[in-house]
């Protein structure tokens, strides 16, 4: 009876607005005078390694161009993937222009660093790129999930400890090790060195002076007190980035495109009871004129009370592709190993 009741519940599906988004991208392409690529993450999506294969598929549709315009909207993810994405884009264009109408945070900021120009709208912002790390030995939160630890947070704890204890202080690290494993602290320190190196590599695509690139990379990794500190356009220019104000008509179309993607990326959770649910949600989207590739979650969720956390089962999540084949719209799976 329980399985029959589950089958009788209609599983929610997110909308796919290919025709609408294609119309907006067509207008942007005509307005900017060059091809446009969209990269959009939902709040539950992130910059991840499979994005590279999705972008490669999109670039196969696009081909070679003098200038490519890249619309970025993301809360971040892997900085190493940012370098791979920019390297791939640079193989298909001489000049890369980042279009930033909204948030372009963390690893997405690193993607923007690889662009020759960054056009920012009135509501746009970049962020610091100081690295936080979710390690297998990280502390647990109230939901029994591993939390991210940043080097800046650890350094501030040590500094405050020393300021308050003075000459009579005990070993600060000895006390800290009760809460944060020493291997996590070492891994986070190593990750920050990697982050600075990645920023230098990304900036080297268009900045020849090593000192300038080093200064920008160090600033983004260590100047700001918060990882999510919003770097607005004037601040971006001040630290040496080639940021400019986005034309109003371009910003208006990008916000319209973001509205379509937000509708596609809405939560699509079907609850069977308080312990079981099914999730269908689009979290990452790549698109250019003629083709759209998106990652859709498709899995069952089960709450394991004894562990106080949700686990997944029957995971059929995958990348999916939509393109035009003559006058028809064709939907296929994009297989990513």
Image: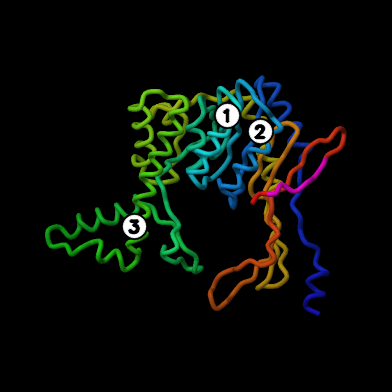
Does 322 appear above or below 170? above
Does 154 appear above or below 25? below
Marks 2/3: CA distance?
39 Å
| Quarter of the view holding residue 273 | bottom right
| Quarter of the view holding residue 176 | bottom left
Q: Residue at x 42, y 24 (%)?
A: 207
Q: Which residue was labeled with disc 3?
A: 185
Marks 2/1: CA distance?
10 Å
Q: Earlier in the sequence, mark 3 or mark 1?
A: 1
Badge 2, how many Cα within 10 Å: few under 14, some, many 20+?
some
**What secondary structure do most residues of the magenta stretch adopt?**
strand
Badge 1, how many Cα within 10 Å: few under 14, some, many 20+?
few
Marks 3/1: CA distance?
37 Å
Range drawn in magenta? 330-335
Which numbered marker is on residue 91? 1
Residue 148 in picture, x, y percent from top left: 44, 57
Which numbered marker is on residue 59? 2
In the picture provided, is 87 more to the left or to the right than 135? right
């Amino acid at each position: 009876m329980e399985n029959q009741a589950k089958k009788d519940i209609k599983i929610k599906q997110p909308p796919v607005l290919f025709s609408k988004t294609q119309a907006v991208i067509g207008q942007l392409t005509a307005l900017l005078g060059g091809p446009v690529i969209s990269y959009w993450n939902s709040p539950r999506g992130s910059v991840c390694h499979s994005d590279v294969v999705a972008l490669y598929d999109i670039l196969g549709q696009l081909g070679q161009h003098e200038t490519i315009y890249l619309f970025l909207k993301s809360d971040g993810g892997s900085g190493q993937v940012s370098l791979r994405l920019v390297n791939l884009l640079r193989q298909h264009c001489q000049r890369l222009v980042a279009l930033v109408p909204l948030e372009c945070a963390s690893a997405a900021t690193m993607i923007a660093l690889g662009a020759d120009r960054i056009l920012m709208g009135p509501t746009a912002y970049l962020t610091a790129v100081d690295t936080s790390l979710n390690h297998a030995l990280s502390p647990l939160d109230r939901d029994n999930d591993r939390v991210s630890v940043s080097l800046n947070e650890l350094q501030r704890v040590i500094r405050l400890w020393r300021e308050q204890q003075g000459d009579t202080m005990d070993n600060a690290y000895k006390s800290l090790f009760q809460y944060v494993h020493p291997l996590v602290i070492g891994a986070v320190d190593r990750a920050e060195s990697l982050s600075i190196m990645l920023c230098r590599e990304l900036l080297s695509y268009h900045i020849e002076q090593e000192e300038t690139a080093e200064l920008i990379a160090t600033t983004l990794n260590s100047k700001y007190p918060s990882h999510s500190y919003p770097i607005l356009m004037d601040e971006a220019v001040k630290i040496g980035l080639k940021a400019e104000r986005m034309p109003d008509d371009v910003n208006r179309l990008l916000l319209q495109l973001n509205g379509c993607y937000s509708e596609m990326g809405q939560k699509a959770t079907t609850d069977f009871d308080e312990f079981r649910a099914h999730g269908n949600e689009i979290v990452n989207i790549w698109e250019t004129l003629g083709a759209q590739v998106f990652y859709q979650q498709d899995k069952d969720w089960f709450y394991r009370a004894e562990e106080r956390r949700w686990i997944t089962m029957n995971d059929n999540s995958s990348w999916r592709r939509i393109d035009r084949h003559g006058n028809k719209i064709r939907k296929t799976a994009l297989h990513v190993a």
